[in-house]
Amino acid sequence: MNLDFFKQTRILDGGMGQELLARGIDPTGTLWSAKALIEPKYHQLIEDIHRDFIKAGAEVIVTATFSARRIRLKENGLEDQFENLNITAGKIAQNVKKDFPNIYVAGGLPPQYLTYEVDTRSNDEIYQSYNEQAKILNPYVDFFYLDVLSSVNEIKIAIDAIKEFEKPYLIGAHISEGTRLPSGEKITEIIENIKHEKLLGLILACVSPENYELNKNELKKLNIPYGFKVNGFETTKPNLGYTDAYKKSKSGNPNEFLGKRKDLGPENLKKISKLFKEDGATILGGCCETRPAHIKEISSIR
């Protein structure tokens, strides 16, 4: 894969997990999108969503592996399915690529501990978590996407953990509010502290458009391709904290405690994305609550 891929405007896909819920999967516990991998009857639905994002204009699809991390499966009593579920996600993405050979499959490597929160485990544990998931996904992906990471340390370790696979990577850093990662670090500290070999770019992942706007000048300082995967949540920092709020959720749908915005329809997101593109962003996409209709509108400004 050409390391200059994201130097020109590229369109990423939207939010797989929330799209699965919108199309009828019934989440159990904190499984979220992993429920669709566990039950074969939903495999075609994952494939259909990948295809719909591509038909809408996406040039990159991310494997449906955000909840297929070991810790999430373990807390739901399904740790023994870790390898199989990640293989399944990779095979589904590759099956789609057979019909769309020009698209790229990104191996989604999510936070290996808690979502929107810093991983406080030992560096060895963090490394092992990223390495084992990457090893399973490696045969099925064109590059790795570090999906919604919350600290410089996690990002550094994840990059080290995928080094042996000799594939490019895209960093997806998360900021819940303000101008700092949940760890308290600034975006510029990421680039100052990592090796740049095989780096494709950096995006703000699962953030609001307002948060992206607040941080875009910091992104400009990086001198690498940058952009966004914006979400349609009202917040990613609920009062209880994401993890506790999720565990107390009755529906298993993050909308229950994060809220769903009503002002980010496809047309509005198109207008916002156009402004961000004109200001220098080349990597344009969506996260939770961005559907194929949103990606279609974003892709129209390419």
Image: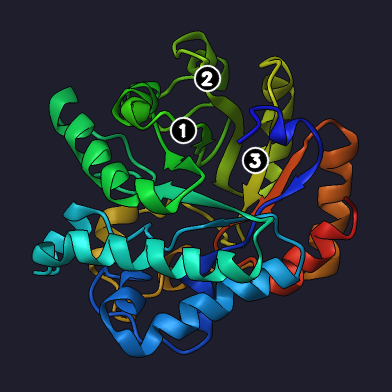
Bin the neighbour count of mark 3 within 10 Å (Cα to Cα): few under 14, some 14-19, many 20 and up: some
Bin the neighbour count of mark 2 within 10 Å (Cα to Cα): few under 14, some 14-19, many 20 and up: some
Residue 141 place in picture, x, y as percent: 46, 49
Asked which secondary structure carries label 1, the reply is loop
Marks 3 and 1 close (CB-CB < 8 Å): no
In this figure, which residue is indicated by the disc labeled 2? 186
Q: Is residue 158 shown to the viewer in this render?
A: no
Residue 211's disc number: 3
Residue 167's disc number: 1
Q: CA distance from mark 2 to mark 1?
A: 26 Å
Looking at the rendering, in which quadrant would you find the N terminus?
A: top right
Which amino acid type is shown beneath numbered disc 3?
Asn
Q: Residue at x 57, y 67 (%)?
A: 98
Q: Residue at x 46, y 89 (%)?
A: 24
Q: Nearer the viewer, mark 2 or mark 1?
A: 1
Q: Residue at x 33, y 40 (%)?
A: 117
